Image (cartoon, grey):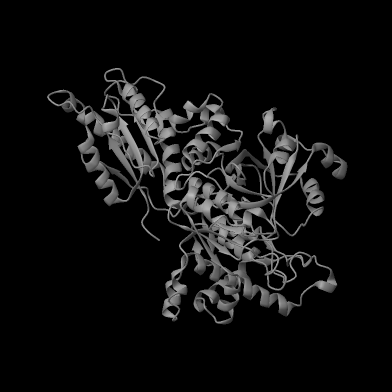
Amino acid sequence: MGRLPKVGIRPVIDGRELGVRESLEVQCMDMAKAAAKLIQDTLRFPSGEKIECVIADTTIGGVADAAVCADKFKREGVEVSLTVTPCWCYGTEVMDADPLIPKAVWGFNGTERPGAVYLAAALAGYSQKGLPAFGIYGKEVQDGGDKTIPQDVSEKIIRFVKGALAVAQMKGKSYLSIGYSSMGIAGSMVDVNFLQDYLGVRAEFVESVELLRRIENNIFDQEEYAKALAWTKENCKEGEDRNNPKSQKSREQKDEEWEKVVKMTLICKDLMNGNPKLKEMGFGEESKGRNAIMGGFQGQRQWTDYQPNADFTESILNSSFDWNGIRQAYIFATENDCLNAISMLFGHLLTNKAQLFSDVRTYWSPESVERVTGKKLTGLAENGIIHLINSGSTTLDATAQQLDADGNPTMKAFWDITEEDVQRCLDNTKWPPATTEYFRGGGFSSQFLTKGTMPLTMCRVNLIKGIGPVLQLVEGWSVELPEDIHTVLNERTDPTWPTTWFVPRTTGKGFFKDVYTVMAKWGANHGAISHGHIGADLISLASMLRIPVNMHNVDENDVFRPSAWSAFGEGLEGADYRACENYGPLYGFKG
């Protein structure tokens, strides 16, 4: 609910008239137009809409011009501020002073006018006023009339805008907690103050009994239900029932469970975002939803001890398609792990793609693999692998059956997904009856194996008493093991669940000494996995939210944070902690 945020471009200029300002007007405004074109041509929202940039009506030469620009931005719904200039300007007089809007300054690297001098003066002013800003300055000197944006500059502009728009899209939305704490998992003990103070997100709580009320009273779209059930029967192939024959459900019971999990999916969608059809049915309050940008379902144990699990619901919501066609993926966490939902949301807002939710289950050393299979790991997997697997509720996009232009496995933004991609994802997924040892109430878990090799980034927000939130991340790849190795390893855990074999990029030192160390240093039982190597984007986003990064394998040259971070010491990790502690959460108060 609410409008999409816009990006404001602020062309600032030397305010001296009678020759100076007049000579710079065109060049300054051209920089703004070039930046706007770059952003609008490169980025889209996860919902598919194009990014809209708003340029100040005039160049900004002093505080009066800055005030006029700020008023326009407020009217237009600007939530991201990018200042551009080729010249000297009057530092604090032309700056953007809104403390809640992420901001960056691009100073043109040219010799005709001192754009770099202004950039330094502006960043010093922002730092002195406690308004962290990203500084953007090209490595190479450009000629004064050069209207191109160098590659290094464009990368920083896009990285900043991606993160800043993620911040803006979260603000004012909700996390929907259906139920509460699951099996003592700390991440599912939803911290309302963390959500509000750091993300600008409110927590909405709905007891899971609400699903039963809506099921029993038919508070869901009956036409969509009929469509959804028919689609599910046609496309979701039931897998082998591996339960003890004495505990297997009858065909009638399984059919009833299929009907119920489809209804659960419709109801969870309605709880998150509302449904005008419910108002037509006489349920006005229920039709409004909770304005949820993400959510989670407690499930275990009270629900799943006597009702079907939500694995189907979670898998379908987290996928880029359902019975209504190809669409934006939802962010919906297993076991109501709010911290993993937040991590998934970060990846989704930065990539526009569906996200994986996985247990970080097992480290398999080369020696252990050889011992149990008689085979050696090779290629990317030769130094060990991490088994990413959970109770069947990760996105079906992770089958990696979507193909790029060269026929390679990938994951796509929904607008690039084809009907053929969707069908391959469905055809390569089975839905075995849930293991009754875990899920007494039944249900169906997705079962698939991630195909081929894809670049992946796994991340996780953790809450640490005395520090607050920290973010850890690791870039790596999915790998496809030989069938004989995969089968042996997979059969040693629950083979009715989806598997992704993950190899982190190691460095031989620190937390990334080897694959084992990565697994040992991971801070929780869950991880959020995104397609692509997006570690640098996550680091920039975290700095905007004042969340320090405690673990990453991103090259230091790609770490891009507000310029004030350099005032907190040379070591990037320590400086990050000190800066985040100094500034405190974006929307809240330091403890």
Q: Residue furthest top?
A: 111
Is residue 45 at all visible to an observer of this figure? no
- Left or right of 376 in this view: 357: left
Residue drawn at 44 percent across, 74 percent down: 285
Q: For residue 181, what is the image quadrant?
A: bottom right
Measured from the top left, where is residue 258 in percent x and y?
65, 73
Measured from the top left, where is residue 204 in percent x and y?
51, 63
- Left or right of 174 in this view: 336: right
- Residue 329 in the image: above or below residue 553: below
Residue drawn at 57 percent across, 37 percent down: 549
Residue drawn at 16 percent across, 27 percent down: 22
Frontmost residue, 216 versus 197: 197
Is residue 47 at all visible to an observer of this figure? yes
Report the label total: 0
- Left or right of 547 in this view: 145: left
- Left or right of 493 in this view: 578: left
